[in-house]
Amino acid sequence: MSESVNDNERGGGALLHEDALIGLISWLAALDDNARPRALADEASIIMPDWTVANGFQIGYLPQFGPFLAYPGVLWWFPHVWQTAAAGPAGIALIVHNPQPLALILRSHWPTTLAEFADLCSKRGCLALYPFSEHYLMQWSGPNHAPRPISETVDVDPKRGALLPFCLESFAWLNPVLRYPWPV
C-alpha cells in the first residue's frame, strides 16, 4: 500500500483502503464513456481514461518532492488506493491489487517526456501523489485562465499526499502497455 506523507491523518489503514477502493469504483463508474477497461489475459486489467480525464492530472519534478503526479483534490481517496506505480513513454500506471492487479493508465501526448519522467521515478524509487493546492487552483479558476505547469511547492498540498513505490520490473504484463504510445 502507499506510504502516506502524513501518517497521523490516515486513521485506520485497512478501513481507509476499503473506503478508497469504494471511491475508485465510484469514480470509474462516473467516467462512463470516458474510460476504456481492457483485460490483459488472466493476469491483470487496465483502465485507460480518455484525454479529457488524463489531462486533469499533471506530472512534475520539484527538488523538494522529486517526481510527482498532481491530482484534483476532490479525489480524496486517490493517494490511499494505489499500491505502486510505473511509467513509460505511453503514460503513467497506478496499480492496485484487489485481488487481481488493476492498473489505471494516464496516457500522454509526450512519449519522450514520459520516458525521462519514468527514469526520474526509477532513480528515486518512488512517485509522489499530491493534490493540487487551493492556492494553485485559485490562480486558474477564471474562465480565461489556462492551467500552468506546477513550478512551486505551494502549488501542491503535500500533507494530503502519498509516496508510491516505483517498479516497472515487477509488472511484466504492464511493460508492453507502457512502452508504446497509444494512438491519439
Image (cartoon, helix red, strand yellow):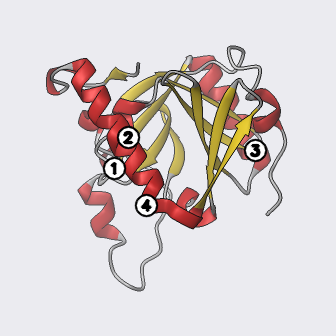
Select label 4 or label 3 by which is in front: 4
Label located before the other in sequence (4 or 2)? 4
- Residue 150 visible in the snapshot: no
Q: Given contact means CB atoms under 8 Å apart, are the residues at marks 3 and 2 in contact?
A: no
In the rendered structure, find residue 85 and report the number of the disc placed on it: none
Q: Is residue 164 left or right of residue 161?
A: right
| Whole-number angstrom distance, CA of label 4 to CA of label 2 | 15 Å
Measure the alpha-carbon separation of dots 3 and 2. 21 Å
Q: Which mark is residue 30?
A: 4
- Asked if residue 11 shows in the view, the reply is yes
Residue, disc 2: 78
Q: Which of marks 2 and 3 precedes in the sequence?
A: 2
Task: Find numbered disc 4 in the image and state the secondary structure of the residue it sits on.
Answer: helix
Residue 122, image x, y percentages: 64, 21
Secondary structure type for disc 2: helix
Q: In the image, which is nearer the foreground, mark 4 or mark 2?
A: 4
Q: Which residue is mark 3?
A: 90
Query: In the rendered structure, which disc, 4 or 3, sits on the residue that comes first in sequence?
Result: 4
Q: Which label lies toward us, 4 or 1?
A: 4
Cβ–Cβ below 8 Å for labels 2 and 1?
yes
Query: What is the spatial separation of the Cα atoms under label 4 and label 1, in whole angstroms?
Result: 12 Å
Q: Amino acid at mark 1?
A: Leu
The residue drawn where x is 47% and y is 74% is 146
Q: CA distance from mark 4 to mark 3?
A: 24 Å
Residue 74 placement (x, y as % from top left): 29, 54
Name the quadrant of the C terminus: bottom right
**Residue at (54%, 46%) from the top-left corner?**
59
Viewer-closest of 92 and 157:
92
Residue visible at 33% across and 49% down?
75
- Give the labeled residue for mark 1: 75
In the rendered structure, the answer to whether residue 80 lies left or right of residue 48 reads: left
